[in-house]
Amino acid sequence: MKILVMHDEQGNIKSIGVPIGPPGQEMRLIPRAGLEVTEVEASHIRDHNDLEQLRAIAETFKVDAASRTLLAK
């Protein structure tokens, strides 16, 4: 599943956007100053409605924007 991740320059995740509509529907996150948004593959997510799982991903992973991947902290 592809997700949008808002993060700082060090890759620390601040927000996660997951698809909630039909397949192919556009997702958007609008970053505030000093943050970036990167689309990454997130095979770690089993249920995109599980907020605890999304929080755990934000706490245990960071973003490598160059490779567009999640890395363990």
Image (cartoon, rainbow, N blue to C red):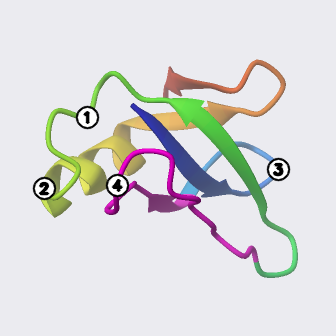
Among numbered discs 2 and 3, the one appearing first in the sequence: 3
Separation of marks 2 and 3 at Cα, in angstroms = 27 Å
Work out whether 40 lies above or below 16.
above
- In this rendering, which labeled residue sits more in front, label 4 or label 1? 4
In terms of secondary structure, where does tag 2 sit?
A: loop
Separation of marks 1 and 3 at Cα, in angstroms = 23 Å
- Amino acid at pointer 2: Asp
Where residue 72 appears, x then y in whole percent? 46, 22
- Amino acid at pointer 4: Pro
Q: Residue at x 34, y 21 (%)?
A: 43
- The segment highlighted magenta reads 14-31
**Residue 34 shown left or right of residue 32 in the figure:** right
In terms of secondary structure, where does tag 3 sit?
A: loop
Where residue 1 appears, x then y in whole percent? 39, 31
Kindly identify which residue carries mark 2.
50
Among numbered discs 1 and 2, the one appearing first in the sequence: 1
Among numbered discs 4 and 1, the one appearing first in the sequence: 4
**Label 1 crowd bin: few (<14), some (14–19), many (20+), radius 10 Å:** some
**Residue 32 shown left or right of residue 16 in the figure:** right
Separation of marks 4 and 1 at Cα, in angstroms = 17 Å
Q: Quadrant of residue 46?
A: top left
Is label 1 in contact with label 2 (beta carbons under 8 Å)?
Answer: yes
Q: Residue at x 59, y 33 (%)?
A: 40
Q: Quadrant of residue 44?
A: top left
Kindly identify which residue carries mark 3.
9
